[in-house]
Amino acid sequence: MVKKASGDGYIQAMDGIGRKTLVYGMNTMMTEFRLKKGKTLPAHKHPQEQTGYLVSGHIILTIDGEPYDMKPGDSWSIPGNVEHGAAILEDSVAVEVFSPAREDYKPQA
């Protein structure tokens, strides 16, 4: 699968958090998140492993109760079924890869 850059396709996942599935295959999925300053991504967990990279902004990422101060260029990997969330300190963009691909993030036809 190949996709060209586009400003279309963002889904408002929750207040101040936009999500766009970029590409996916049999085992992985790449997703971009646009995060608004002052918003919170509530603690949650899912069976997929999640590996991410902060493109821009500033967040406090909490993984299994441990806070991490993340700035552009920082990255993370969260095992499946481990609780995580984030406080968004500045408007931010993160790119994350999920394995296996999340069925709930696949674009609807």
Image: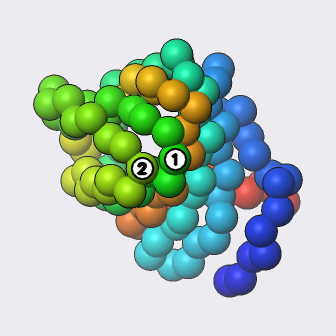
Residue 59 horizontal/vertical position (percent): 39, 33
Residue situated furthest top in the rendering: 38
* Quarter location, residue 45: top left
- Looking at the image, residue 79 sits to the left or right of residue 94; the answer is left
**Picture coordinates of residue 57 (x, y %)?**
50, 39
Q: Is residue 33 visible?
A: yes
How much space separates mark 2 and mark 1, taking CA atoms?
Answer: 5 Å
Regarding mark 1 in the picture, which secondary structure is present there?
strand
Q: How many marks?
A: 2
Horizontal and vertical percent position of residue 51: 35, 59
How many residues crowd mark 2 within 10 Å: few (<14), some (14–19), many (20+)? some
Quarter-of-image position of residue 37: top right
- Can I make out residue 103 in this image? no
Q: Mark 1 points at which residue?
A: 56
The residue at which mark 2 appears reads as 72
Residue drawn at 37 percent across, 43 percent down:
71
The N terminus - image quarter: bottom right
- Using the image, determine if residue 81 lies above or below residue 64: below
Q: Residues within 10 Å of mark 1 (few under 14, many from 20)?
A: some
Q: Is mark 2 on a helix, strand or loop?
A: loop
**Image position of 6 with respect to 2: above or below:** above
Residue at 32% of width from left, 41% of height from top?
Answer: 70
Q: Which colour scheme is used?
A: rainbow
Q: Does the CB distance between marks 2 and 1 fall below 8 Å?
A: yes
Q: What residue type is labelled 1?
A: Ser
Which one is earlier in the sequence, the residue at label 2 or at label 1?
1
Image quarter where the C terminus lies is: bottom right
Residue 30: x %, y % from top left: 54, 64
Q: Which amino acid does label 2 sit on?
A: Pro
Checking the image for residue 47, the label placed there is none
Name the quadrant containing residue 60: top left
Relative to 29, does residue 105 appear above or below in the rendering?
A: above
